[in-house]
């Protein structure tokens, strides 16, 4: 079952165990502590600027995937509402199933309903999510570069 869910303390508790797995798979900075600002997520959600989409196992109700999207007009194209993927995750045993494709289709339909014109996904160069997105009709639009300039706090 895939659906939009509110960012509640219960949901945060359910998602938290997956964060370390996601960090290990995705980060370029292993020493940086992952510490989501859940209060800001909730505040942005209250303003309609964040949506959380959850995939749950229909038998166990366990989370099998999730996505967070920031919804806002693009600063360069202010007449167009964009959905920027902030985080997307699927449990490893579901990645080769139909769940990710169904999830993306659901997010597209929901975000279109919300009035979004463009969905922007980001992916790491070392995983296969970009190849997967291309198969679903997405095109590569930009490449980002990171440089850590302050290793302290």
Image (cartoon, grey):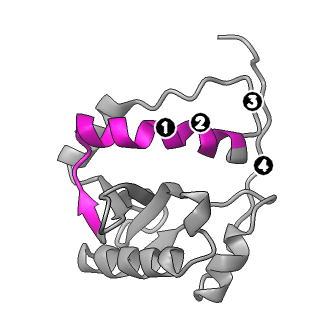
Disc 4 element = loop
Contact (CB < 8 A) between labels 1 and 2?
Answer: yes
Q: Which residues fall within the magenta stretch?
A: 3-24
In the image, which disc is placed on residue 20? 2
Disc 1 element = helix
* Number of numbered discs on residues: 4
Q: Nearer the viewer, mark 4 or mark 1?
A: 1
Question: Residue 84 in magenta?
Answer: no
Q: Nearer the viewer, mark 2 or mark 4?
A: 2
* Quadrant holding the C terminus: top right
Spatial CA distance of label 2 from label 4 is 23 Å
Give residue 107's position: percent from left, percent from top: 38, 73
Give residue 59's position: percent from left, percent from top: 30, 66
Residue labelled with disc 4: 145
Q: Nearer the viewer, mark 1 or mark 3?
A: 1
Task: Name which residue lies at 39% across and 55% down.
Answer: 63
Q: Nearer the viewer, residue 111 or 91?
A: 91
């Amino acid at each position: 079952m895939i659906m939009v869910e509110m960012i509640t303390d219960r949901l945060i508790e359910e998602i938290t165990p997956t964060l370390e797995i996601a960090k290990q798979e995705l980060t370029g900075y292993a020493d940086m502590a992952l510490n989501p600002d859940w209060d800001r997520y909730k505040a942005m959600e209250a303003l309609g600027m964040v949506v959380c989409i959850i995939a749950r196992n229909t038998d166990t109700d366990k989370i099998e995937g999730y996505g967070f999207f920031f919804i806002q007009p693009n600063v360069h194209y202010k007449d167009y509402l964009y959905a920027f993927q902030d985080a997307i995750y699927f449990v490893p045993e579901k990645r080769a199933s139909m769940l990710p494709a169904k999830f993306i289709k659901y997010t597209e339909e929901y975000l279109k309903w919300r009035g979004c014109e463009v969905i922007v996904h980001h992916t790491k160069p070392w995983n296969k999510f970009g190849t997967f997105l291309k198969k679903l009709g997405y095109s590569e639009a930009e490449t980002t570069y990171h440089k850590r300039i302050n290793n302290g706090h």
